[in-house]
Image: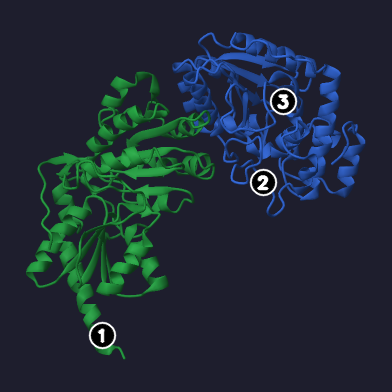
Chain colours: A blue, B green
Amino acid sequence: MLIENVEKTTTVEELKKIASQVRRDIVRMVHCCSSGHPGGSLGCTDYLVALYFREMKHNPQFNMDGINEDLFFLSNGHISPLWYSVLARAGYFPVSELGTFRKLNSRLQGHPATEEKLPGIRVASGSLGQGLSVAVGAAQAKKLNKDNRLVYVLMGDGEQQEGQIWEALMYAAHHKVDNIIAAVDYNGQQIDGPCDKVMSLGDLKAKYESFGWKVLECPEGNNMEAILATLEKAQSLTGQGQPIAILLKTEMGYGVDYMMGTHKWHGTAPNDEQLAKALAQLEETLGDY
Amino acid sequence: MKKFTFEEKIDTRSGFGAGLVEAGRLNSNVVALCADLIGSLKMGDFIKEFPDRFFQVGIAEANMIGLAAGLTIGGKIPYTGTFANFSTGRVFDQIRQSVSYSEKNVKICASHAGLTLGEDGATHQILEDIGMMKMLPHMVVINPCDFNQTKAATIAIAEHYGPVYLRFGRPAVPNFTPKDQKFEIGKALLLNEGADVSIFATGHMVWEAIKAGEILEQKGIDAEIINIHTIKPLDTAAILKSVQKTKCAVSAEEHQISGGLGESIAQVLARNYPLPLEIVAVNDSFGESGTPDQLMEKYGLTANDIVKAALKVVERKAAMKSLSV
């Protein structure tokens, strides 16, 4: 195991409260500009909250090189509302700035970008399949720097259809990049329908394993305790010559009843009525922006 | 006209290899990646001296670009190496998003560019790479003319912060520029002063431009010859200074007539100082198998083609003069 001495003091209750507020931020942000991607953002909320508020050692006084810090890369950049909310709530930039999402001259671009120097973002993403390569490169930079912190990356499951993902998987195993934990948002949905209907991924676990990765499954990807247990296990497996993957079985739109059980909310914003219904289901815990 | 000589012919890709290992010595953050072409890219010396700073990527260029972007996070200066066609067209979106848009300090080093790649044929002879790369914001585009200049450029780009596209070639060509030259990104080099026509050339065409200058001198035409090794950022001041004197211009490049140096110069002229311009380049065609010399001949990229172009613009200049008020 590579990392030692990370104080993990945030409780499950606290994490759940933060997740609830982040979900409120997400639906309000996409409603406000009538565009954006709420489904996947809501689905991955618990995972990203777990990372930023407990599992990762990181500094909101943001530095691009991130020496001696854990790094996070979002390859499925369209769930930017989630990442922006988490970064703001973690202190990277003012929470009030969330109201500028997708607006002209905003630092909060539709898909994550670095040109506007939004603290927390290290590479642009949005065109799929690229973030894993970047994360692997950053992990190798850490090795060269004798920096034994970890690199985390999140990808979509539809995104697994991009060939570059498999180039990066092959490479990471071959070069024993064992300081990386890559998660797949395994919600089974993509724009044109369920993944199984659009382009079946087959046995994704077996595929990753045959490419030389160690795979952990988290069948309850929206259960905070299950997420933490999976992350603990993943961290304990680093530094043993194999890169680590987590298949995170989430539900798209989790937390808002009408957004769950369908692929329709991948990239559609709620209207006023729908927003009200969503907010009624999500407790305001940290104060709306 | 100034006299230009060379002691030997060496391939510019060897200049890259020599520059890479030197850059590695000067800065321990310089790292290198290659997509299964270390021999062709002459990366052997770097690999021998810095094995821990070299990453073999296999035939996976998209991943290579992403890895390079990631390696900059933590302060590395990655040089990627493969053929120019695989360095650009194949991975344009990766360069656009992960490198250009993300302003990463990646040096995309592209060998075997142009027709002079030779017998492998058109699938490998990229003629669109300057166009693709110059259109990307933040990208610096460099096409050095010989071994010495390629070596100097390879070393210099480590000092520049931001994405760079460095393009060089396969065959041995005259090595005529000074050995330990200091390479300045974006600074056009005046090789020969002249009054009658400005010839702007890049890469392998610079030596052809020099030969063209000698032929033109025999015809009583005094050619000003300028090496534009940096297509982006373009040294517009040097271009305008020259054409304000000569009043007509020729550009020469181992590239399509669209989207390359010629078109960049055309933009400068059209927007500032319109005058006769001929673009010596491949005329909207793919290449084919052949020897480098045969191909340059067949596709119109020789000194004689530059001479013909120069005669054309000199004539148009004269015609315009007789029409003007």
A125 displayed left or right of B318: right
Helix, strand or loop at mark 1: helix
Q: Chain of mark 3?
A: A
Are dots 1 and 2 on a single chain?
A: no
Amino acid type indicated by mark 3? Tyr
Residue toward you, B43 or B301: B43
**Image position, residue B268 (x, y; %):** 39, 67
Residue A60 is at least partly visible in this image: yes
Q: Which mark is residue A21?
A: none
Write the residue at 87% across / 39% down.
A288
Name the residue that disc number 1 marks: B321
Q: Chain of mark 1?
A: B
Q: Residue B274 is drawn in which quadrant?
A: bottom left
Q: Which mark is residue A52?
A: 3
Residue B110 is at least partly visible in this image: no
Q: Split into 4 quadrants, where in the image is the N terminus of chain B?
A: bottom left
Name the residue that disc number 2 marks: A109
Amino acid type indicated by mark 1? Lys
Q: Residue A184 is drawn in which quadrant?
A: top right
A72 displayed left or right of A264: left
**Image position, residue B35 (x, y; %):** 36, 29
> In the image, is residue A177 above or below residue B262?
above
> In the image, is residue B55 above or below residue A231?
below
**Image position, residue B58 (x, y; %):** 38, 26
Are dots 3 and 2 on a single chain?
A: yes
**Image position, residue A102 (x, y; %):** 71, 49
Helix, strand or loop at mark 3: helix
Amino acid type indicated by mark 2? Gln
